[in-house]
Amino acid sequence: MAWILLLLAGLFEIVWAFLMKASEGFTKPWPTVGTIAFMIVSFGLLSMSMKSLPLGTAYAIWTGIGAVGAFVVGVAVLGEALTPMRVGGVLLIVSGLVVLKLSSSH
């Protein structure tokens, strides 16, 4: 169950990162409210997953899901550059997440 909560926390992190971009420096009210709401949910789910997952593993996977997800949203939705170097960086993040998951005893 902790891994499901962590996955959901990471997905909510992607949403709040996108909304933060859409808030344009917190100058647009609704994206700002959405950012804060999704942050609260994401942090709450992360903290619940940390009841049974190791701190380093949970936090790294949460940030990794958010980083990779924000990258994908940036490319797919916002038209950000998809360069070999950026893809390589994301692949390094994903490989690190896989190693962390495989090394966890939970």
Image (tube, helix red, strand yellow):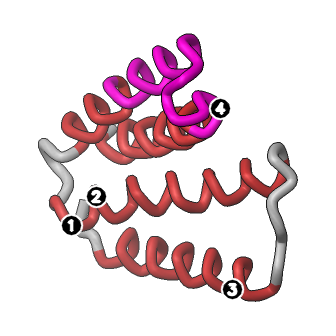
Residue placed most toward the observer, 47 or 19: 19
Quadrant location, the N terminus: top left
Question: How far apart are the two marked residues, 2 and 3, measured between alpha carbons?
Answer: 22 Å
Question: How far apart are the two marked residues, 1 and 2, measured between alpha carbons?
Answer: 5 Å
Residue tagged 4? 22
Question: How far apart are the two marked residues, 1 and 4, measured between alpha carbons?
Answer: 30 Å
Secondary structure beneath dot 3 equals: helix
Label 4 with label 2: CB-CB less than 8 Å? no
Question: How far apart are the two marked residues, 3 and 1, measured between alpha carbons?
Answer: 23 Å
Q: Which mark is residue 88?
A: 3
Secondary structure beneath dot 2 equals: helix
- Name which residue type carries label 1: Gly
Residue tagged 1? 56
Label 2 with label 3: CB-CB less than 8 Å? no
Q: Residues within 10 Å of mark 4 (few under 14, many from 20)?
A: some
Residue 17 lies left or right of residue 37; in this view the side is: right
- Name which residue type carries label 3: Gly
Q: Which residues are magenta?
A: 21-40
- Name which residue type carries label 2: Tyr
Dominant SS type (magenta) = helix
Report x, y in % for residue 82.
83, 71
Question: How far apart are the two marked residues, 4 and 2, measured between alpha carbons?
Answer: 25 Å
Label 1 with label 2: CB-CB less than 8 Å? yes
- Name which residue type carries label 4: Ala
Secondary structure beneath dot 4 equals: helix
Residue tagged 2? 59
Judged by depth in the image, the label closer to the viewer, 3 or 4, is: 4
Above-or-below relation of 48 to 83: above
